[in-house]
Amino acid sequence: MEYRLIPDDRNEEFRRLVSYAFSPESGPGLDDEEKPHPGERYGLFEDGTLLCVCRHYDLTARVRGEERRVAGLSAVASPPEHRRRGYVAELLRESLADYRDRGIDFSLLWPFDHAFYRRYGWGTVNDYARYEATPETLAPAAGPDRGRFRRVKADEWASLDAIHRAHGNRADLSLRRSEAWWRRRVFERWSDDPYVYRWDDEGEPRAYLAYTVDDDGETTLRVTDMAYADHAALRQLLRFLSVHRSQIDRIAVRAPPDWPLFEMVDEPEEVECSLHAGPMFRLVDVAQALERLDELEGTLTISVSDPLAPWNGETFSLSGGGRTTCEPTEERAMVETSIETLSQLYAGYRPLETLERVGDLRSHEEDARPTLEALFPARRTYLVEHF
């Protein structure tokens, strides 16, 4: 078997495999023209036969407050005649090795099934909430009528990027978007392109939102992206949404679980809210990732199990007091864990105490706990972008 880029002349085959995996109800035809993607298509081949496929994105995201290269993984698909033969596991294994060769220490994905990717070492890295309410329900949360809303085009992406970056600084995992990302993933969508509006206050861009409108029994405005400089700017976005009451039945927004909507409306019982497990995160190279940490004082030995990456299935010795070093060792492990739990701990998704209780992290020496707590304090994590 051979893992490699899928050439352009086989793009139609790639699209058909992905379509069958994620939307078989659409049938075998592909009538629409594919919109450009910023990612690269990869596949696993055997004697020229394409066994399974995926798409890779070379991203930059905040990890523990620092911008790091992160590999985005999506469109993992295999036709039914090649399933249950270990081909997808091999594709994921080759993908991790590829990321490692490129010097990328972290992988992110949005799973079709969380249990499937947990099996291969990815761990959930943030939750998100879906809020739905009528425009009338949102009206009391609206700010005073000030500033100016206007529809913006893709050529104005840079004015939105400054708002997005300031908004994203409140949580880890926010992406640094390229121009291509803005054009192809914000101003364009897989089906209907969204409306994009920006709010300016005294000539300064302060907030924006992108949304689509669909009518499936009732007319719903679905916010696909938004960012705001502060609470006052958020209230302006809610004002903009609430003024659609003459034509929209429902407003749907995906936001962090701690989004303050319940506290802002007069009738919170009229807001429907559901909590969901979000994207998944994985360390690609444990040693390289741990050496990026500078909070370690003293030493720590940690044993890691990894179902895909043999270079991670080791006991590692960490030494700090300056520049952190991490090397394989034969010493007895002070801590044992899986790559999934270590990845969640590293990202800061859950504190150590929680992962000891619900994960598979075990400390064999009491002295190891304070070291781990200092090394991996919990962080606020929230990934906006789907890919």
Image (cartoon, grey):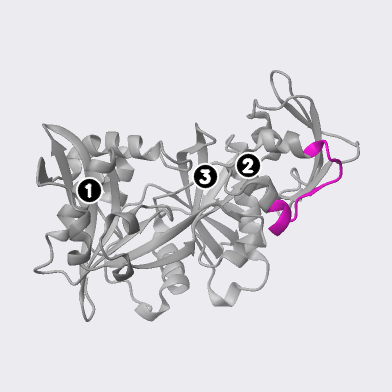
Is 60 left, or right, of 343 in this rendering?
left
Q: Is residue 208 visible?
A: yes
Q: Which x, y percent locates residue 228?
A: 27, 42
Q: Which residue is mark 2?
A: 346
Residue type pointed to by label 3 = Ala
User: Which tag, 2 or 3, sits closer to the chain's start?
Assistant: 3
Is 262 left, or right, of 278 in this rendering?
left
Q: Which residue is mark 1?
A: 235
How many other residues sit within 10 Å of disc 1, few (<14), some (14-19) or many (≥20)? many
Outermost residue, top side: 322
- Disc 1 secondary structure class: helix
Whether pointer 1 and pointer 3 mark residues with C-beta atoms closer than 8 Å, the reply is no
Indicate whether 366 appears above or below 224. Answer: above
Residue type pointed to by label 2 = Tyr
Disc 2/disc 3 C-alpha distance (Å): 16 Å
Q: Quadrant of residue 18?
A: bottom left
Q: Which residues are magenta?
A: 355-368
Q: Which residue is mark 3?
A: 71
Q: Quadrant of residue 372?
A: top right
Q: Which x, y percent locates residue 136?
A: 17, 66
User: Which tag, 1 or 3, sits closer to the chain's start?
Assistant: 3
